[in-house]
Amino acid sequence: MEKSKKIHLVCKDNENVTVRPSGIFVSGYWKLGADAALKVEFIYLHQTKDLPSYRQGRVVERYLVPFEGQQRYVFAIEPMDEPLTWKGEIPVSKVKEAVAEPA
């Protein structure tokens, strides 16, 4: 059985985050490989790599959208109240690149 996939992302001050009336939050515009984007199950947003996540949850939707002339991923995320510390080696910021990290 394949482990669930988690991605930790630096997303300062809720940049490009919106919250739907249902409470689901949407985060974009991420430059990820298709394999990572399609397999990710949980996303953790961090103010910095050194701080625990401030928004996190289970991915319920994902789609590609045009953004600044390139295709980027947007995720709709069902929130969870379980912050995590940073996992992974690449700090992610405005470039919005990330790698999947097995649970």
Image: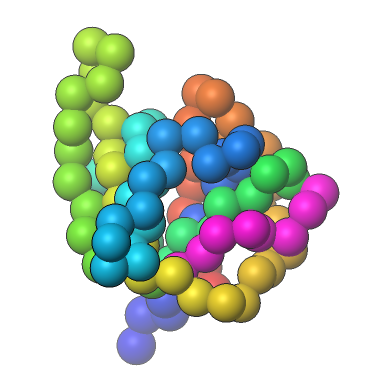
Say whether residue 46 is magenta: no
Say whether residue 51 is magenta: yes
Quadrant of the frame with the C terminus: bottom right
Q: Is residue 19 above or below residue 96?
A: below
The answer to whether any part of residue 87 appears in the image is: no
Which residue reaches farthest bottom? 1
Q: Is residue 103 above or below residue 46?
A: below
Q: Is 56 positioned to the left or the right of 26 in the image?
A: right
Q: Is residue 20 above or below residue 1?
A: above
Q: Nearer the viewer, residue 34 or 71?
A: 71
Please provide percent x and percent y for residue 54: 63, 58
x 61%, y 77%: residue: 82
Please provide percent x and percent y for residue 58: 38, 71
x 61%, y 38%: residue: 13
Magenta residues span: 50-57
Q: Main secondary structure of the magenta part?
A: loop
Which residue reaches farthest front? 21
Please provide percent x and percent y for residue 100: 47, 54
Please provide percent x and percent y for residue 40: 36, 61
Q: Nearer the viewer, residue 102 or 82?
A: 82
Which residue reaches farthest right? 50
x 28%, y 39%: residue: 73
Quadrant of the frame with the N terminus: bottom left
Q: Is 73 positioned to the left or the right of 99 in the image?
A: left
The answer to whether any part of residue 48 appears in the image is: yes
- Residue 59: name its quadrant: bottom left
Q: Is 83 positioned to the left or the right of 17 in the image?
A: right
x 36%, y 38%: residue: 28
Q: Is 80 positioned to the left or the right of 28 in the image?
A: right
